[in-house]
Image: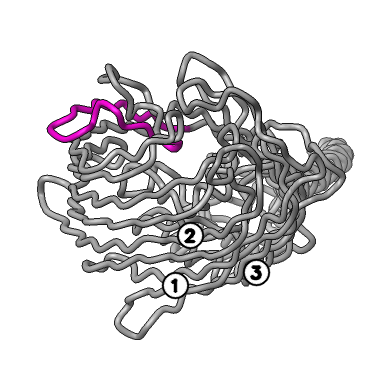
Amino acid sequence: MKLFEDFPTSHYTVGKSKPTALPLIMLTLICGTAIPAQALVLYVDPETNQVYTTPGKNRVKLGKFKQVEEVETAHSTEELKELDTKLDKKIEELKAIETRIEEQQNEVMVAEQQDQETEKTEPTKKDEKKWYDSFKIGGYTQFRYNEGISGDYKDLSSPGDKGIEEDTNFNIRRARLVFSGDITDHLKIYMQTEFASGNVKVRDMYGDIFFDKKREFRIRPGLSKIPNSFEILQSSRNRVAFERADALSSGIRNERDTGVFFYWTPEHIQKRFSFLSKNLKGSGDYGVIGFGVYDGQGINEHDLNENVHFAARVTYPFEFSNGQIFETGVFGYTGRFVPTVGTNNGADILTAPTFNKSGYRDERIGLHAILYPQPFGFQTEWNWGKSPQLSADRTVIESGDINGGYVQAMYKIDNAWGSWIPYIKWQTYDGAEKFTTNAPLSKVREIESGVEWQIRPEIELTVAYSNMDRTNVKTLEQVKNANIMRFQLQWKY
């Protein structure tokens, strides 16, 4: 018997989800004994394995089938048995193939599941940052030019700006390089070096140790700024005026000392401090509450007595419904300070003044208020206290009063040419310069008016005129009505 011709085997594969050739072969054997004498065309639906005699949707042609003569059938009985045996073998082979394919499919499924699980865990490993991934390097440089206009400007001398001296024109006021980064979620390090004046000095070297994931509570051991006033904590890269007011910087010259401090800043205020620092000349995040202890002798200086200074500051930046931000607070410190004494021919001090080696009462308390420039801004600070001070006859160091502060107004203008801040600052101070040899008395009356032009976010040019009436702490002479122009180009990196 001729079973089939033109059989479309290419439509069938052995697999888990598709029909196999096995049912079709069995169907063919059955049909081979029951089909009529004339040729019959058969069709099969691969989805259901249903056999049809007419074509239709999703039906595949099997071929033409016809019944052979009885004589031929009888004559071929042995052949049919032999064919039946071969078919049984083929069926077993097909079953074996199907089993192997199922096993392979299972292996593939297991491998795919393992890959998916690996993909879920791998991103976590990739996202795991090393401490050096968040490490940043930055800083800024301030390049200045000073020019005297009139008055006794040749006799000027300022403890806060060594560039204000005779025969000094171009100078690099500051050249800072900062290294900072998060070591972990609970530790951040900060290092700053100074390259100006032909020397390399360490300005900051501390670690912030956070107690919680929100970073609201932290301690800061190391060399860092003292939590005191607003200008003391405001970076020079953000300050509009050329220098900090003498009334504040005379208490913490260079703004830093070695100690340990505690800071608390609520999470939403952290964001506000960050915004202010980046956009509106803020002081940065030194806590809503900050306090701690430090040596008290000044930056990179050894303590000269067994007494430490204690400093504290409370501040809060209020934000009004119109977006205007106003910050106010109170600050102060207390301790005992040991002054440096020596001869000074320029001031006719031929014998070093006598002094108390255990130090003198050194304390201040002050207030600050800042209306951030949006666009008009106003800033003022004032402090009072006690400090070691050279006596009137210049023979002994004694305890004296200090008093002083400043008022500053400014206006921020943003246009196509950049950001402009015209400003005017008036300051006054009566008190000792305790970090200068012999802690001489200093009197300062100064008006500074200028404009800062931020050409690009990284480049600023400031031009200012100053009328100065201040004590030359080298000669102890009062220099009055000195007028100078100052220019500063600052670039950040």
Depth check: give the residue in front, 26 or 380. Answer: 380
Total labels: the figure holds 3
Secondary structure under tag 1 reads: strand
Amino acid under label 1? Glu
* Residue 358 appears anywhere in the view: yes
Q: Which mark, by number, is residue 230?
A: 2
Residue carrying label 3: 289
Determine the residue located farthest toward the left in the rendered image.
416
Q: Residue at x 33, y 21 (%)?
A: 171
Determine contact: label 1, label 2, CB under 8 Å. yes
Please name which of the two marks, 1 or 2, marks the residue nearer to the observer. 2
Query: If you read the primary sequence from the N terminus, does the residue marked by circle 3 or circle 2 appear first?
Result: 2
Depth check: give the residue in front, 253 or 107. Answer: 253
Residue 334 located within the stretch drawn in magenta: no
Magenta residues span 139-160
Q: Position of residue 343 (x, y in %)?
A: 60, 23
Q: Residue at x 48, y 62 (%)?
A: 403
Is 490 above or below relative to 237?
above
User: Disc 3 and disc 2: Cα gap in Å?
Assistant: 13 Å
Q: Position of residue 128 (x, y in %)?
A: 71, 43
Residue carrying label 1: 327
Amino acid under label 3? Ile
Q: Position of residue 468 (x, y in %)?
A: 26, 44
